[in-house]
Image (tube, rainbow, N blue to C red):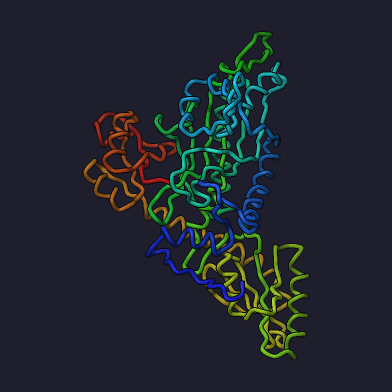
Amino acid sequence: MAGEDLGLKAKKSENFAEWYPEVVLKAGLADYSPVKGCMIIKPHGYAIWELIQQYFNKRLKELGVKNAYFPLFIPERFFKKEAEHAAGFKPEVAWIEAEKGEERLAVRPTSETIMYDAYARWIRSWRDLPLKINQWCNVVRWETKATKLFLRTREFLWQEGHCVYATKEECEKETYLYLKEYERLCKELLAIPVIPGKKTEQEKFAGADFTLTVEAFMPDGRALQMGTSHSLGQNFAKAFGIKYMGKDEKEHYAWQNSWGFSTRLIGAVIMMHGDDKGLILPPGIAPVQAVIVPIYFKDAEKKKVFEVCEKVKKELENSFRVEFDSREEYTPGFKFNDWELKGVPIRIEIGPKDVAKKQVVIVRRDTGAKVEVKLKDVANYLSDALEKVHKNLYERTLKHLKKSIVEVKDYEQFKEFAEKRMLLKCGFCGKKECEERIKEETGLTSRCIPINAKEKKCIICGKKGEETYFSKGY
């Protein structure tokens, strides 16, 4: 790293398209792969993903969902069983061509078909229900023209939950439940506000009765889908023969849902919270929540400063993810820039004067505010400071979301604001021809129909409709 230029050349407010990949690369989150459309997730980026996994795995266990793993390869005949699903994924599927007389295999774009073949064998009675399984895995979708690290790559990591129920009511209730979990994750862990809602018929998951989504709005004027939850009805159950013997001693088809989020959540955090110095990580997903940086100018000062740094680290490391930057080949200024680039929420500075005063200097990454704190109070102060960092990040992104929403009354106003990259709320009937016209003429797509949407006339045809959000998307 010696001699490296840590500073960002692009400004977030001036050139977002160049700023984003520069942050990803210089902060050590990911790198481009020699395989077109793929990415390498570096340790710093993967550590963030692991913290997201840890948070969500805890929630899954509380909800009675168990983790499993299914094959990467899917027989071609499985895709043909559910016609709408097969048609929806046809352009995105990567195939492994088989030898003569053997069946082609698809590289997993999503796991409904491979999992539901097993579910049909496992489920026999109402006693086997509900069946709730999640898997953390990679998927491949052969669609990417331009690689955008964490946002659009041919291969990416995700979680996908697949549940089976005895009744429609229970299935749909939990479809909404998992959406609520995604909304909670975005707020509590990522400090990102989202709009929960239902996808239009044209934008729903292929093979679903309906799709729910949580949508965030990025600083560059584009919406980002943060997670989806699909009510599959009995469509896949009938295609794969997922039946159970009910308490009434009659055979019934089961009801299903599926739900997932991906590593694009990391991309959302970068875009929402980062600044011209680099990343700003919410404390819950920061691999290092606080870094201790020693400051000394004479060798005679080093020993005492290092002793206090080690003492502070030892006191904090059982409760926080803390690191002592003891590298001697770099100046304090270089270290400050390095850790700011990586997004560490709190910096703890300790110099000879601090040693003499039995204190430290604590600096917040989100505001740059500095405060002197007595050694005996560091742990309590750090806990409070991390909460304040999270709260501040969430509040300012919520302010951004609210400022970005524009309610339009007619199509002329819609077209006017479409060029300004805002999140437009308007009446929409849900018909394919109206949605296609909007997309063709403005480049905007429907994001969601918000939960408890008000009834409003469609801005295109004037017929009965509902409040719907539109914007450009990733």
Camera-nearest residue between 182 and 104 = 104
- In the rendered image, which quarter is residue 357 located in? bottom right
Q: Is residue 160 above or below residue 312?
A: above
Indicate the position of residue 334 as horizontal and vertical percent values: 59, 77
Q: In this view, does 319 lie to the left or right of 279?
A: right
- In the rendered image, which quarter is residue 462 located in? top left
Image quadrant containing the N terminus:
bottom right
User: Count of labels shown?
Assistant: 0
Indicate the position of residue 272 as horizontal and vertical percent values: 48, 57
Indicate the position of residue 315 as horizontal and vertical percent values: 77, 70
Q: Is residue 110 above or below residue 294?
A: above
Q: Is residue 381 above or below residue 271?
A: below
Residue, x 24% and y 41% (percent of image)?
410
Indicate the position of residue 275 as horizontal and vertical percent values: 48, 65
Residue, x 24% and y 31% (percent of image)?
461
Camera-nearest residue between 32 and 282 = 32
- The furthest residue to the left: 412
Q: Is residue 277 left or right of residue 360?
A: left
Residue, x 62% and y 24% (percent of image)?
116
Camera-nearest residue between 16 and 376 = 16
